[in-house]
């Protein structure tokens, strides 16, 4: 057990060590069931030391969806084996098992078919590249076909080929419009293929002071729909520094699961380009345009929706360049 403790301290990035860490056995209030239930919602990897059966029984009532379940590992008491038992890919259990096994000098026991065969894993690819999987059932069907045939195909939306950069791909995959298995695009897709949605869309917003969250969210959703962008593609909501505490904008970013970032007047004024200026906006916040300039200040390659105004709110959208990394 001491060796396991030392290894996990090392995995902690050196923030703690066995030298300043006394291994203690503490009773958890409520027992294993309460600990498992509470830990399951933290987003952290759960590590059980002991028998797999104990871990399986403990987590069984709380297993819900592979897209949201945390990674769960089991380590035997002699630290010979590290076994990912839940959410190996999306939850990161396989990667964590490899790291911990390397530190402990143990063996990572992997049972997922793509890992055993060394094949492309679409869920790992999605996680590594911050891609949203449109449908987990379609992802499962794609993996089954890939394992059966040894081949898969993908295509990138023509509209975003300059922004979605494809490097060298695994031997089992090839680009093909005719027999596309995977469609990569931030746009709304009505087809029947698996879509991977890159978080490449940045929305710039401005608003009157204390504008309501519901109204801002509704406005942003409407604007995205007008340009055919999937809401899951939003990476960030951006604005000017004077709006950094604007709760409606903060809530809008939270709604999209996106970063909220603001820029100073100087940063926005320094951005080069052709923007929809307003004397009133300049007199109010110090810069002639907030939504378009903030989108470009974030690092977008181009604006895909120019400034749109409605009832004291402004909206613009841009797209960033993203290089897809393949394992």
Image (cartoon, rainbow, N blue to C red):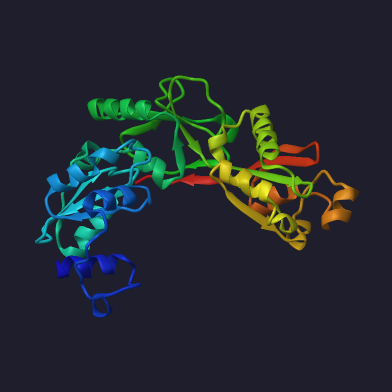
- Where residue 17 appears, as percent x and y from the top left, is 28, 75
Q: Nearer the viewer, residue 142 or 165?
A: 142
Residue 168 appears in the rendering: no
* Snapshot quadrant of residue 48: bottom left
Residue 195 appears in the rendering: yes
- Where residue 222 appears, as percent x and y from the top left, is 67, 30
* Snapshot quadrant of residue 241: bottom right
* Quarter of the rendering occupied by the N terminus: bottom left
- Where residue 303 appears, as percent x and y from the top left, is 69, 41
268 lies left or right of 177: right
Q: Given the current orientation, which residue lies at the most extreme bottom position?
A: 19
Q: Nearer the viewer, residue 160 or 8?
A: 8
As drawn, 74 above or below 65:
below
280 lies left or right of 219: right
- Tell me what residue is drawn at x 62 percent, y 28 percent: 228
Q: Given the current orientation, which residue lies at the most extreme front position?
A: 30
225 lies left or right of 281: left
As drawn, 317 above or below 18:
above
- Tell me what residue is drawn at x 30 percent, y 47 percent: 37
Q: Nearer the viewer, residue 29 or 175?
A: 29
- Tell me what residue is drawn at x 57 percent, y 41 percent: 255
């Amino acid at each position: 057990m001491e060796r396991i403790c030392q290894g996990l301290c090392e995995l902690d990035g050196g923030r703690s060590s066995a030298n300043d860490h006394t291994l203690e056995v503490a009773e958890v209030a409520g027992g294993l069931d309460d600990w498992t239930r509470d830990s399951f919602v933290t987003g952290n990897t759960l590590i059980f030391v002991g028998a797999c059966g104990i871990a399986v029984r403990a987590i069984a009532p709380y297993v819900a969806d592979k897209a949201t379940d945390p990674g769960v590992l089991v380590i035997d008491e002699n630290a010979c084996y590290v076994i990912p038992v839940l959410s190996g890919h999306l939850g990161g259990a396989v990667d964590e098992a490899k790291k911990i096994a390397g530190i402990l000098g143990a063996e990572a026991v992997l049972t997922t078919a793509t890992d055993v065969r060394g094949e492309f894993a679409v869920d790992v690819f999605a996680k590594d590249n911050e891609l949203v999987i449109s449908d987990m059932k379609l992802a499962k069907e794609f993996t089954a076909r890939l394992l059966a045939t040894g081949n898969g195909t993908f295509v990138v939306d023509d509209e975003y080929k300059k922004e979605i950069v494809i490097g060298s791909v695994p031997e089992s995959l090839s680009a093909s419009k005719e027999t596309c298995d995977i469609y990569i695009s931030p746009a709304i897709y009505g087809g029947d293929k698996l879509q991977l949605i890159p978080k490449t869309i940045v929305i710039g917003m401005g608003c009157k002071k204390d504008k309501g969250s519901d109204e801002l969210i509704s406005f942003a959703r409407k604007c995205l729909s007008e340009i055919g962008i999937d809401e899951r593609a939003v990476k960030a909501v951006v604005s000017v520094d004077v709006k950094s505490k604007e709760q409606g904008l903060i809530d809008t970013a939270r709604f999209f699961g996106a970063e909220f970032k603001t820029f100073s007047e100087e940063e926005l004024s320094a951005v080069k380009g052709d923007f929809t200026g307003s004397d009133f906006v300049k007199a109010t916040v110090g810069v002639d345009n907030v939504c378009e300039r903030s989108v470009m200040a974030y690092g977008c390659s181009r604006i895909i929706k120019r400034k749109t105004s409605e009832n004291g709110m402004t909206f613009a959208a841009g797209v960033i360049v993203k290089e897809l990394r393949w394992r």
